[in-house]
Amino acid sequence: MSDRLQVVIAPDSYKGSMSADIAANAIARGWAATRPGDTVMCYPQADGGEGTAEIIARAVAGARWCSVSDVPGPDGRLRDSSWLRLPDGTGVIELAHMSGITLMERLDPRAASTRGFGMVIDAALREGVTSLILCLGGSASNDGGAGVLRALGADLLDGHGDTVPDGAEGLLSLASVDLDHVPSAPPGGVTLLTDVTAPLLGPSGATAVFGPQKGIAPATAERFERGLQNLARELRSDPSRPGMGAAGGTAFGLASIWDLDIVPGAEYVADKTGLTRALDDADILITGEGRFDSQSSSGKVVGTLAALASEKGLPLAIIAGSVQSGHDGATVDLTRIAGSAAAAMSDPEHFAELAGAALANHMSDQSTHEKRDQTQPQ
């Protein structure tokens, strides 16, 4: 390894505190201040969750945003939203923009809906998109995509022929689904970007694994599972297919109306942004996220980049808001640097910059030790 390094910085967003772009630039400032002779390159990343569409927009020349007004958020409050149109006519729509958990004033898994996401998909179809890339992640709901289906023209009815309410609670009274008025997929097809491989149902499904972060208590989990079972009974898609549990089962709902591809979001973004190619000439890769834990290795940015780094024999360092899992390479815990989670959240850019400097110092110390070892008599 030469004295001057090619440093690639490619974090995910730090949910609730820093976008991937802000985090990457802060880490880069800290590294550059400590090792100004190195070449530092930033490739902000995402995995289909919050910030994915923005990162694709920066990576694709000629991409433009299309506005959609008065879209219901996951709690029903109206807001303005948007989707991304690529030069080839592809529409990129991020669920977190209009149905994400960060839009909730308080968690409400019973009523939270994906209807807004469906309305934006419908708007893109009406604008004549040639294909769709749907970014699933960061959802507030556990409705199996029922809100999406309803926004696209489906009727979800109870045993009396009345429309069931929005949200997961409505699925408990679901008796039939009419899909006759749902539009066809665009000619170029539909791709889902996800960060999970979970099926819809069971101990590794949407409710069991991701329900708690949406406010589903253990005592009520059975009711939410039963609602998704009702939906699975009425739709033709296979609930056991890997990825069907993504975004509270939204992947399952979409797969019931269209043939589609499910793609790991982190891999797609790494390729689209040029990160995969950049790693060929890199000396070290730095990534990060809000919480590094046992789930980080399953489809998330950090786990995906760890596999890429291992494949290329590249050192990997991780900067996380909180480090809850082990890693063979260097890790920096922002909460530990700041003294508390509250302090880290109060000025995340500052502590990310300190983390970048700490890693650069660690690399300098490591290089010094290597040189010293090489000059020792044999």
Image (cartoon, rainbow, N blue to C red):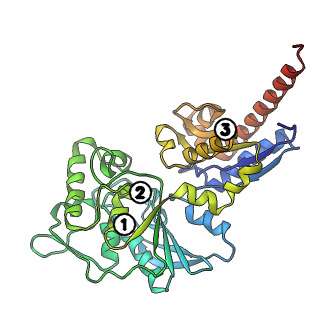
Q: Determine which quarter of the picture holds residue 244.
A: bottom left
| Residue 216, x across and y down, in percent | 30, 48
Q: Is residue 68 left or right of residue 258?
A: right
* Mark 2: amino acid: Glu
Sort mark 1 into few (<14), some (14-19) or many (20+) by Cα contacts within 10 Å.
many
Q: Which mark lies nearer to you, 1 or 3?
A: 3
**Residue 114 marker:** 1
In this rendering, would 356 be left or right of 343? right
Percent across and percent down for residue 192 are 46, 65
Quadrant of the drawing holding the C terminus: top right
First of labels 1, 3 by sequence position: 1
Horizontal and vertical percent for residue 264? 50, 56
What residue is at 32 percent from the left and 73 percent from the top? 257
- Is 65 placed above or below 305 here? below
Rounded to the nearest angstrom, the CA distance separating label 2 from label 1 is 16 Å
- Note whether residue 140 is visible: no
Q: Which mark is residue 61?
A: none
Disc 2 target residue: 105
> Mark 2 vs mark 1: which is more N-terminal?
2
Where disc 3 sits, the SS reads strand
Q: Which residue is mark 3?
A: 317
Above or below, 251 relative to 78: above
Q: Are marks 2 and 1 in contact (CB under 8 Å)?
A: no
